[in-house]
Image (cartoon, helix red, strand yellow):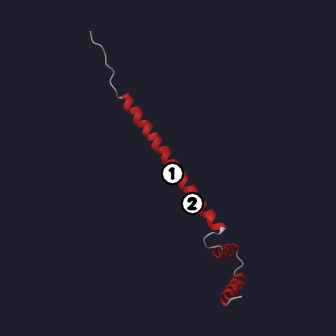
Amino acid sequence: MSRHEKQEVETERSEETRCRCPMCQMMHALGRGKGPGKPFWEHLTNARIEVLRAVRSLIDERIDHLEKKKTERSQEKKATPIAVE
């Protein structure tokens, strides 16, 4: 085991004995899960993408609604020719 690995193990042990709060333990676990290719971060990236897609769907829906409303208004305002005798 390298010196760096030993130091990490000692740090983890001291943090675990120092903090027994579930939130602290979760935050320490998240910190150890950092790095590209880790499943946790892949899930978070996918979640961010899904949130952005959800927002995009709301925007698209609103654009469609406004375009439909605009089309309806333009059709309502057309004059109808009337034959005068």
Which of disc 2 and disc 1 is earlier in sequence? Answer: 2
Q: Position of residue 6 (x, y in %)?
A: 70, 88
Q: Residue at x 48, y 48 (%)?
A: 59
In this rendering, the answer to whether 11 lies above or below 78 is below
Q: Residue at x 54, y 53 (%)?
A: 53
Gap in angstroms between the C-alphas marked 1 and 2: 12 Å
Q: Residue at x 53, y 48 (%)?
A: 57
Q: Would you identify the image quadrant in which residue 69 lies? A: top left
Mark 2 element type: helix
Going by the numbered disc 1, the residue's amino acid type is Arg
Q: Position of residue 15 (x, y in %)?
A: 68, 83
Q: Position of residue 85 (x, y in %)?
A: 26, 9
Going by the numbered disc 2, the residue's amino acid type is Arg
Q: Which mark is residue 48?
A: 2
Q: Nearer the viewer, residue 3 or 53?
A: 3
Q: Which mark is residue 66?
A: none
Q: Would you identify the image quadrant in which residue 45 lies? A: bottom right
Mark 1 element type: helix
Q: Which mark is residue 56?
A: 1
Q: Residue at x 61, y 73 (%)?
A: 35
Q: Position of residue 63 (x, y in %)?
A: 45, 44
Quadrant of the snapshot with the N terminus: bottom right
Mark 2 crowdedness (10 Å alpha carbons): few <14, some 14-19, many ≥20: few
